[in-house]
């Protein structure tokens, strides 16, 4: 059992922003947020796409219809319904429709590989999947490997079918599992995270509070997929969501100005591309109050460039599938460069020693732990508890807090390594390496070494023109020296390879496992020890 909110374990955990959770969280099921918004603002546009507008009243009615259709398709209530996270209205309808019908909705990332997709759907025991046509074709091909999958529904809208009376308890248990989210699977098979109605409604309230969302807000969603975080928080606030499926860096700016947006949501990889776009100096944001980034780290340089050009804060958030997802966010009114902010209302955070697990004071690095009402019910089919005895969840991230409780992330615990007895962060090395004008992209992993444990191995993508015909490109020893002269000895790069691309996930995270496999596979001619020997 978790301790009361005022219980202190070790040093006092960092408090959230000066916003209280009391009174912000309604006693509603997840789909009840939509029902409430439709009652309060039936004619307000809920979702705007290039194909047209959908009001809250119309969206709620479509969800009622979808609920009946899904129950008819499954043949019972209480099943797991997979919904592919496409950036369109059918996703919204199927997502809330599954929950309204008394099913558990499993959000499916269409960018997962075949093996990961089969593992995820099989683990969650998905009975039926709602998918756009191109994903449905793929799922049909995978069905022989999914004996429990009863069918794949393909439609612009779900078939018409009203929810029969009595098919759903009018007052569902708010602590029942409403949604299954899958972890990214970048370091192993995706895990099935069980999120309750209360988890998701609470986090929607937390996000709306720190982002300043209300009924007058217009949010631009410039993500490749529809993440329930942005959906639920906007519906909680009865705000208008503008979906921008065009991946071009400037498309979101144009959409924001066209629709008089107040908030612009994007990924670090897209914001970095916007910051580097030659057209940036000609762009402006007319009504946007804040640009918000999440999913992976946004480097300070592009954040600064965008903030200076647009004259609005460019802020970062932090969270995990296990936390519904948001736990931290910079307040647009009080950004702290390089930080992911303080805990959202009702959430606690502390940093503990990686080995001894003792809580650490401000400024010291260790593993980040969080505790709060948005924390999952647990992993599906897990063999043990996901938290310690006091309810703290270990995130697997290395970071530190300042005296005011702002969290600064350093790296993933699975990515850091030790050189001698020093903890080395690949991300910190990359942040120096990317400053060299000849480097367009880069990644660093550990390279095992008997004498010291491991050394840094860098992979570099050269900037356009560097190393082109007639240009010998940068001297790699000089490039290595550029980095090593700016870092302590235990972070020095010993190996450096030039590559065509850095493997990344759809949200921009480096797939270090692929690079480690390349390091471990050979001491090939391309593996080039630098002149530095630490």
Image (spheres, helix red, strand yellow):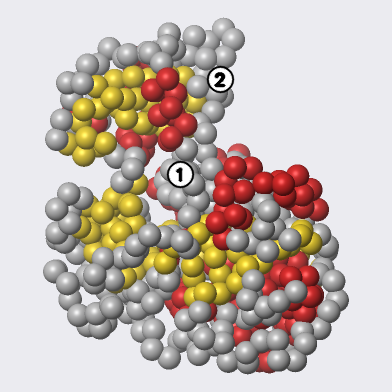
The x, y position of residue 233, in whole percent, is: 55, 74
- Residue hosting label 2: 465
Relative to 150, say whether 239 is above or below: below
The x, y position of residue 226, in whole percent, is: 63, 61
Relative to 16, say whether 280 is above or below: above
Viewport quadrant of the N terminus: bottom left
**Which quadrant of the structure image shows residue 59?**
bottom right
Residue at 59% from the left image edge and 42% from the top image edge: 115
Residue at 80% from the left image edge and 53% from the top image edge: 133
Residue at 47% from the left image edge and 38% from the top image edge: 511
**Which quadrant of the structure image shows residue 81?**
bottom right
Horizontally, residue 250 falls left or right of residue 10, namely right
Viewer-proximal residue among 357 and 440: 357
Pick out the residue farthest to the right. Answer: 160
Q: Earlier in the sequence, mark 1 or mark 2?
A: 1
Residue at 50% from the left image edge and 59% from the top image edge: 192
Tell me the element at label 2: loop
- Residue hosting label 1: 188
**Which quadrant of the structure image shows residue 408?**
bottom left
The x, y position of residue 180, in whole percent, is: 54, 65
Tell me the element at label 1: loop
Viewport quadrant of the C terminus: top left
Horizontally, residue 108 falls left or right of residue 22, namely right
The x, y position of residue 494, in whole percent, is: 29, 20
């Amino acid at each position: 059992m978790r301790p009361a909110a005022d219980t202190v374990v070790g040093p006092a955990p960092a408090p959230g922003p000066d916003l209280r959770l009391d009174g912000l969280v309604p006693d509603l099921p997840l789909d009840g947020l939509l029902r409430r918004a439709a009652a309060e603002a039936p004619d307000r546009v809920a979702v705007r796409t290039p194909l047209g507008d959908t009001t809250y009243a119309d969206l709620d009615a479509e969800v009622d219809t979808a609920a009946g259709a899904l129950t008819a398709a499954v043949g019972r209530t209480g099943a797991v319904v997979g919904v592919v996270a496409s950036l369109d209205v059918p996703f919204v309808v199927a997502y809330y429709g599954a929950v309204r019908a008394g099913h558990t909705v499993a959000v499916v990332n269409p960018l997962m590989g075949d093996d990961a997709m089969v593992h995820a759907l099989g683990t969650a025991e998905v009975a039926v999947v709602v998918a756009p046509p191109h994903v449905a074709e793929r799922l049909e091909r995978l069905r022989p490997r999914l004996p429990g999958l009863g069918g794949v529904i393909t439609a612009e809208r779900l078939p018409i079918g009203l929810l029969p009376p009595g098919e759903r308890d009018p007052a569902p248990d708010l602590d029942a599992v409403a949604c299954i989210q899958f972890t990214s699977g970048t370091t192993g098979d995706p895990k099935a995270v069980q999120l309750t109605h209360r988890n998701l409604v609470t986090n929607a309230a937390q996000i709306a509070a720190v982002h300043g969302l209300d009924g007058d807000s217009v949010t631009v969603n410039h993500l490749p997929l529809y993440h329930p975080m942005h959906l639920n928080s906007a519906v909680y606030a009865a705000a208008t969501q503008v979906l921008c499926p065009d991946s071009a860096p400037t498309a979101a700016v144009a959409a924001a100005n066209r629709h008089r947006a107040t908030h612009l949501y994007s990924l670090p990889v897209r914001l970095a591309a916007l910051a580097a776009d030659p057209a940036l100096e000609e762009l402006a944001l007319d009504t946007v109050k804040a640009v918000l980034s999440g999913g992976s780290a946004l480097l300070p340089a592009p954040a600064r460039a965008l903030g200076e050009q647009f004259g609005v804060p460019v802020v970062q958030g932090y969270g995990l599938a296990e936390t519904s997802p948001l736990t931290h966010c910079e307040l647009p009114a009080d950004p702290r460069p390089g930080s992911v902010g303080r805990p959202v209302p009702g959430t606690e955070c502390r940093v503990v020693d990686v080995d001894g697990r003792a809580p650490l004071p401000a400024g010291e690095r260790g593993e980040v732990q969080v505790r709060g009402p948005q924390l999952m019910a647990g992993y599906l089919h897990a063999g043990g508890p996901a938290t310690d005895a006091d309810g703290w969840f270990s995130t697997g991230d290395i970071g530190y807090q300042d005296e005011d409780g702002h969290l600064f992330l350093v790296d993933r615990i699975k990515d850091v390594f030790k050189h001698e007895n020093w903890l080395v962060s690949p991300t910190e090395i990359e942040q120096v390496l990317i400053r060299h004008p000849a480097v367009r992209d880069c990644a660093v992993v550990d390279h095992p070494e008997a004498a010291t444990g491991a050394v840094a191995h860098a992979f570099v993508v050269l900037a356009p023109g560097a190393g082109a015909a007639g240009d010998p490109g940068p001297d790699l020893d000089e490039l290595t020296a550029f980095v090593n002269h700016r870092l302590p000895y235990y972070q020095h790069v010993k190996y450096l390879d030039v590559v065509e691309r850095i493997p990344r996930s759809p949200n921009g995270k480096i797939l270090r496992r692929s690079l480690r496999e390349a390091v471990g596979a050979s001491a090939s001619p391309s593996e080039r020890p630098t002149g530095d020997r630490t």
